[in-house]
Image (spheres, rainbow, N blue to C red):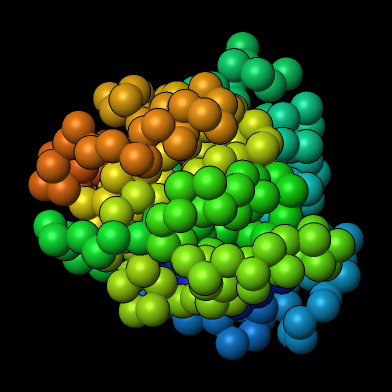
Amino acid sequence: MRIVQVVPNIIPIPGSGGIERVAFLLSNELVKRGHEVYVYALAGSSSNAVIIPYGHRGFFKHNIKDFVIHTLPDDVDVIHDHTHDLVIGRENLNVPTVSTIHTEWGLSIPLKFPVYVTKTKLMMSTNNSHGAYVHNGIDLNGYALEKNKDDYLLFLGRIDREKGVRDAVRLAEQTGMRTIIAGPVWDQELYGEIYPRMEKAPNISYVGEVHGMEKQNLLMNAKWLLFPTACEEQFGLVLVEALACGTSVAAYGRGAVPEVLQGLPQFICDNFDDMKRLIEGLSPFSPQELREYVSLRYTKEKMTDEYLELYWRAIRASRI
């Protein structure tokens, strides 16, 4: 099959964002299975597929559509649109196009072949009568299992209000537990609010944005990953990454979090006090049990199986 993947033009793949990592893993797995894969992405991207670069960082989003349409390889069987605004999927091209909705604002976009990253979001959407869902997957071999944890809490995510970093700082202040805050600053006003508090607390360290082994080391050695999300999460990929390392998670049950943690309901917190009680106690699961949970549900192989089925479904439907 000749497959085109279209990703956002914000950071090169594999990048640090969930969309970029999912598209990277999916494309590589498709190539491994013998498919011919092209990926529209920023210059500097890495993939086993053929990269068709947009050009330079900052390429205008609305021009992605024109660029893809005018440079599309011949005889493409299916296009997979991962862009934030689904700029290809909403065009009704002659080529079957599967569109994965990675954003909250994408829930109401009318699409021919919509795919959500959780059943929760599918049922919340206007496409629930004909849409599908595929859980995000990770490369399990890329995450090492660590059974002996260090005594620290970890917040790993954007420094913005949606990700709930203020509650992570507050938890550190009230428990006195060593806490590492990691992630890029997206909200300068919020950062200006919490930075003096982090500087004042000797048990809190802010380490900025992390990648690669630095990120994995933080995940695998943490006693708890904090996920005090303040938004209706589409998925929450960092939860799966932590669990793959055998690290327990404490998460607010917003959006799709209860679905992702369906088999681990003890990790779902109703409020701040609930999360505080959880992290001050012992985890009810062993590291090995947490990794096994991921291996049965959230792997790149399982994700690829399900997307291939949807590709064929879209191709068959287009021939009717």
On the picture, is 103 further left or further right than 121?
right
Q: Nearer the viewer, residue 200 or 227?
A: 200
Residue 275 image point, x, y percent: 46, 34
On the picture, is 299 further left or further right than 270?
left
Residue 197 image point, x, y percent: 68, 63
Residue 90 appears in view: yes
Residue 21 image point, x, y percent: 48, 63
Whether 271 is drawn above or below 1: the answer is above
Q: Determine the image quadrant of residue 249.
A: top left
Q: Residue at x 46, y 47 (%)?
A: 175
Residue 308 appears in view: no
On the picture, is 28 further left or further right than 234?
left
View extreme (top): residue:
129
Q: Nearer the viewer, residue 65 or 134?
A: 134
Q: Residue at x 61, y 12 (%)?
A: 129
Quarter of the image containing the C terminus? top right
Whether 64 is drawn above or below 112: the answer is below
Q: Determine the image quadrant of residue 11.
A: bottom right
On the picture, is 76 further left or further right than 92?
left
Whether 267 is drawn above or below 155: the answer is above
Quarter of the image containing the N terminus? bottom left
Count of numbered marks: 0
Q: Nearer the viewer, residue 292 or 58?
A: 292
Q: Residue at x 80, y 44 (%)?
A: 91
Residue 65 image point, x, y percent: 80, 60
Whether 68 is drawn above or below 233: the answer is below
Q: Residue at x 73, y 18 (%)?
A: 126
